[in-house]
Image: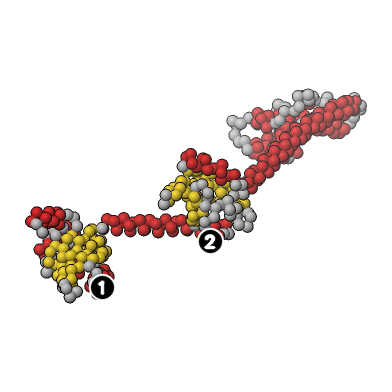
Amino acid sequence: MKLYDIEIFRELVETGNDLFCWMDNKGLFRYVSPSAEKILGITPDLCIDRKAMDFIFKDDRRHTMDIIKKCVEKNIRSTTIENRIVHKNGETRHLMWTVNLKFDQQGALVRTNAIGKDITQRKQAEEQLRKSEEMWNTLFMASPTWYVLVTLEEGKILDLNDTFCTDTGYRKEEVIGRTTIEIGLWPDEEDRYRALPLIKEKGSIDKMPIKLRMKTGDIRDFLWSSTIIEIQGQTCLLSVLVDVSDLKRTQNQLAFINKKLEERSQKLAEMNSALKVLLEQRDNDKKDLQYRVWYNIKNMIQPHLNNLRLTKLTPTQHAYLNVVANRLNEISSGIGQKLGFNAYNLSARELEVAGHIIEGKSNKQISDILNISVFSVESHRFSIRKKLGIKGSRFNLRTHLLSLTTSIDDRQPDLADVQFSVE
């Protein structure tokens, strides 16, 4: 070899990133290129007279030795070996070795030349890819939704997950290699053909409502999401399908229930309107009854009492006549109706006293009308205050009683102001 060629060879060997080395027939380093410091972590001079096998990862040594032994036995002069070496800092690196073996005339191994290329980054990328593929396969197969890979134009099924088989009832071998049309997956084949132009235009679809037929013939509702991908030069569709049949059934049931509730609400509103009319009619009937009572007393009883007053009566008869006249006057004035529920707490005598207080009569006048003492009237006034919950002189009893009363029908005059003329 010319000196010029030797210089070029040395320049390539000593400036390159690959590890150049040669070992004697005992496997001891006799030459190691400068890249050893980068790959092995030590300078080339520290490698000389050391066994190359000592730098190889322990678990890869037997595999490496088996390949070398096989080459020696069969007089194979070149081979490739992939193994791991251990850097001085403990880091493991992957190397691809191109190995050339030199034999003498008797076939004995004289030396071994090797070029080691660091492929650590490639192996790491491959390992990452492998893990990603494993993760994808796990997600693909274990997903509760359908994953289906088909060709774009024909719809030929290339792969699918276990959920598809579980839900449809098909086995994988029944559908792989067949089209979705052939297995009858589409109740209406035109649905797929109508979706294709949209997929081609946008490159994907998202949550398109469709119907699909199971092996049993049942038709279920799905949301279809799909995107175009290239696999080994073939245009395919990767589809994700979510079964929403139960959700749609629930929505329909809720819609039915809501409709029934609206109908019942409408009926209840109608009943409330009818009840309101009945209550108004009851109030009108009540007012009519009050008016008829007042009218009958005034026109059918009062004239007879006035006639009876003109007759010759004994003092006792006059007293009774006064009591009857006063009672009729109180009934016709509607005091029981006016006080409402508050009247239920008052005794009959207290109700009489309250009626006269509302009419503005004094204690003396009330005592004369009811033939009781003034002290009794005052006692009744105190009891009325207590039952109505008003205490103290700052509350006017007559004003409070008036505030509790309800107005009588406008057509009915106040008979409290109409006194029977009885001596």
The crowding category of the residue bearing disc 1, from other C-alpha atoms within 10 Å (few below 14, some 14 to 19, many at least 20), is few
Q: Which of 321 and 90 is in front in this view?
A: 90
Question: What x and y, as percent, mark residue 243?
Answer: 55, 51
Q: What residue type is labelled 2?
A: Glu
Q: Quadrant of the C terminus?
A: top right
Quadrant for the N terminus in the image: bottom left
Against 346, residue 26 (above or below) is below
Furthest residue toward front: 105
Where residue 378 sits in the image (x, y, percent)? 68, 34
Residue 260 placed where, x, y %? 68, 43
Q: In this view, does 6 lie above or below 79?
A: above
Q: In this orientation, does residue 144 appear?
A: no
The residue positioned 19% from the left and 57% from the top of the image is 18
Name the amino acid type tagged 1.
Lys
In this rendering, is residue 305 above or below 167? Answer: above
Q: Do the residues labelled 1 and 2 touch (CB within 8 Å)?
A: no
| Picture colour scheme | secondary structure
Q: Residue at x 62, y 36 (%)?
A: 390
* Residue that mark 1 sits on: 74
Residue appearing at x 12%, y 64% in the figure: 31
Q: Is 390 positioned to the left or the right of 158 in the image?
A: right
Question: What residue occupies the far left of the structure in this picture?
Answer: 3
What residue does disc 2 label? 173
Distance, label 1 to label 2, CA atoms, is 46 Å
Instruction: From the viewer's side, name the closer residue of 223 and 296.
Output: 223
Q: In which quarter of the image is residue 272?
A: top right
